[in-house]
Image: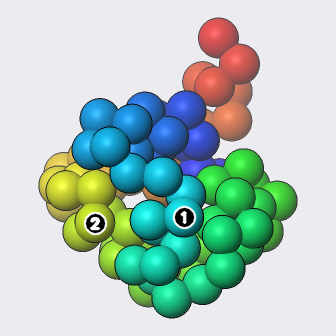
Amino acid sequence: MLNTRKLKGRMAEKGLTQKDIAEALGIATPTVNQKLNNVRPMDLTEAEQLAKILDISAEDFSAYFFANEVALRY
């Protein structure tokens, strides 16, 4: 499960919209929205591409892309 808040926050820091992400990944904007909101799964290749776009380091990768569901509730 993606850490939606953390990813959207990083997008805001970088000044990127879901449309920008969609264009960079070569997918439709509604698909990006669904993936960022955990409606559709994001595959590893997409996650790696998104991490590169958002300048997410390898050390921080898991905090963005493997969020603990319990931790997100608090």
From the image, tell me which residue sits under label 1: 19
- The percent coordinates of residue 42 (x first, y second) are 61, 72
Residue 63 showing in the rendered view: no
From the image, tell me which residue sits under label 2: 53
What residue type is disc 2 on?
Answer: Ile
Does residue 70 appear to the left or right of 5 in the view shown?
A: right
Residue 56 showing in the rendered view: yes
Query: What residue appears at the point 82 percent right and 59 percent down from the top-left corner?
Result: 39
SS of the residue under disc 2: helix
- Relative to 61, residue 9 above or below: above
As drawn, which residue projects farthest toward the right? 39
> CA–CA distance between discs 2 and 1?
13 Å
Which badge, 2 or 1, is on the more N-terminal residue? 1
- The percent coordinates of residue 46 (x first, y second) are 47, 79
Q: Nearer the viewer, mark 2 or mark 1?
A: 1
SS of the residue under disc 1: helix
Query: What residue appears at the point 72 percent right and 50 percent down from the top-left corner?
Result: 37
Which is nearer the eye, 11 or 50? 11
What residue type is disc 1 on?
Answer: Lys
Does residue 71 appear to the left or right of 23 in the view shown?
A: right
The local crowd at label 1, few if under 14, some if 14 to 19, many if 20 or more residues have their Cα within 10 Å, is some
Which is nearer the eye, 65 or 4? 4
- The percent coordinates of residue 40 (x first, y second) are 78, 69
- Determine which of the numbered discs, if any, sits on residue 11 in the image: none
Query: What residue appears at the point 38 percent right and 51 percent down from the top-left corner?
Result: 16
- The percent coordinates of residue 28 (x first, y second) are 67, 79
The local crowd at label 2, few if under 14, some if 14 to 19, many if 20 or more residues have their Cα within 10 Å, is some
Question: In the rendered structure, are the residues bearing label 2 and label 1 in contact, judged by CB atoms less than 8 Å apart?
Answer: no
Query: What residue appears at the point 19 percent right and 56 percent down from the top-left corner?
Result: 55
Q: Quadrant of the C terminus?
A: top right
